[in-house]
Amino acid sequence: MQPLRQDVVEITGQNLTIEQVISISRHGTKVVLSSDASERMARGRSILEEAIRRGERIYGATTSVGPKTSASINQANTAEFSRRLLRTHNAGHGPVAAKDVTRATVVNLLNSLASGTTGARPALAERLVDALNADRPIAMHLWGSMGQSDMSSMADIALALFDDIDLEAGEALALLNSSAMSTAVAVLSFVDLHRLLQLSTLVGALSMEGYAANPSIVSDIALQSRPFAGLHRHGSAIRAYIDGSYILAEGGPRNLQDPLSFRSMALIHGAVEDNLSFSKQQIERELNSSQGNPVISLKHGGLAAVANFDMVTLCMALDVMRQAFAPVFTSSTERLAKLVDTTWSGLAIGLIEEDGIGAPGFNGVALFHKSITSEARLLTVPLAGELASSSHSNGVMDRASLAALGGRRGLELAQLGTSIVAMELMVAAQAAELRGRTPLGRVTGELFAFARKAIPFAAAGERPPNVQPLLERLESNRGAVDSMMASNN
């Protein structure tokens, strides 16, 4: 996914994209509230106020919330009720969110208010605009969301930005009853994992050269035999990366059929790509969907009590996204294990020539790689089959989606996955150099040179390099890596 280059993002409440959220949250892009959104919010507010004047019972506006829904709110006490409602739910603790997570949460909340479906005044949206454009720091805690709105996290934001004003009827609930944080971590984890998948394919291509693998897996015959978009994308990418490589020449590949961790790579990564496409579609729909209760209809001029805060759709999309990476990481571990094992690779044991001392070479790296792969795979466990409790809020809140946890695990998965891929890159570069076959591919050769600027070749008697310098180089030179990954376009 290419970064969005935009000076200002106009918030309409209707068409926010993943790319725009990333631009605002990670690159500091300014925002502006569209005039249509302001008008929509004003109409939504008018509908809510008219319903209040008619004496309708409206959750969070004329009644209390949760187990006290039966209690009516005297409109003269609205401001005090709102203050107490925010403080009551300000129970979040644990880690404070990173800046990009907080900014993404604020822009998601802004977009939700801009839809006009919450009844909040345009003035509240303008405060969120000002906070984003001033890059105002907000301490938002990550723990506490059950995926039925992110009330504890949203209370942090609401108190930071609105504690000095009197909120009107329904506005405190509009700020609290939002899943903006869940959606934020969903967006950020999707982007990080999607990029990781592209990097995995690039590194896997160099592993093929280190192994002297058979490239028939990305031939026209192979790719055209299965009409899956993801397979074609990643198969074509591998073919572009190894263009000009020795493994494409007569006598280049060592085997007719390689282990499946090599042979199925395009199939696996392609399947993940297709599943990520589904997850992206669901996440972007969630970005522009109502997440509150009640919901105001500008079309019908009325309100309805709903459960739009239930993030089951988002949780399932995140489950699909995380689960898809389990075979990616397992296959990476197997490729690395095959490269360091002389029985499979035909190279020196542990990929370091023996000097008479008997050190195991890169075998220790392979064991560490398996360790973090196991840890990463545990993060892929689905969460939609949640543990429900009927004891909360008089039995009304009797299920949970855990979407926020699903997004947070996605971010952790991307971090661990980057280490997994970096270690495969380190081992693939060692194997390719030790094998001594040339040339490497047009792009894999560039990747090899890139890696060598961070980690040296380990000659006889030398220890394997530490992967940390390579991880730092991958992070500090994201543009160069993105350019290599885009070479297949």
Image: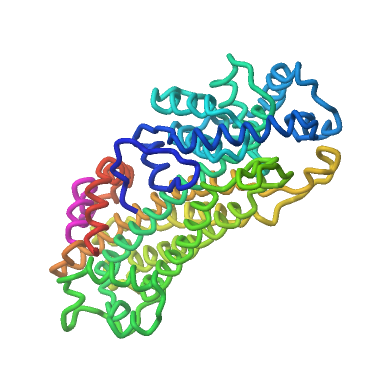
Q: Is residue 96 visible?
A: yes
- Which residue appears farthest toward the top when viewing the image? 164
Residue at 61 percent of width and 55 percent of height: 313
**Colouring method of the image:** rainbow
Q: Is residue 160 above or below residue 430?
A: above
Q: Is residue 466 visible?
A: no
* Number of dots carrying numbers: 0
x, y percentage for residue 221? 30, 85
Q: Nearer the viewer, residue 446 or 298?
A: 298
**In the rendered image, which quarter contains the C terminus?**
bottom left
Q: Is residue 450 left or right of residue 3?
A: left
Q: Nearer the viewer, residue 371 or 376?
A: 376
Q: Nearer the viewer, residue 280 or 59?
A: 59
Q: Is residue 276 left or right of residue 156?
A: left
Magenta stretch encompasses residue 446: yes
Residue at 76 percent of width and 35 percent of height: 58
Residue at 24 percent of width and 48 percent of height: 455
**In the rendered image, which quarter contains the N terminus?**
bottom left
x, y percentage for residue 466? 32, 45
Q: Is residue 483 left or right of residue 376?
A: left
Residue at 40 percent of width and 71 percent of height: 261
Q: Which residues are magenta?
A: 445-461
x, y percentage for residue 452? 20, 51
x, y percentage for residue 135? 40, 25
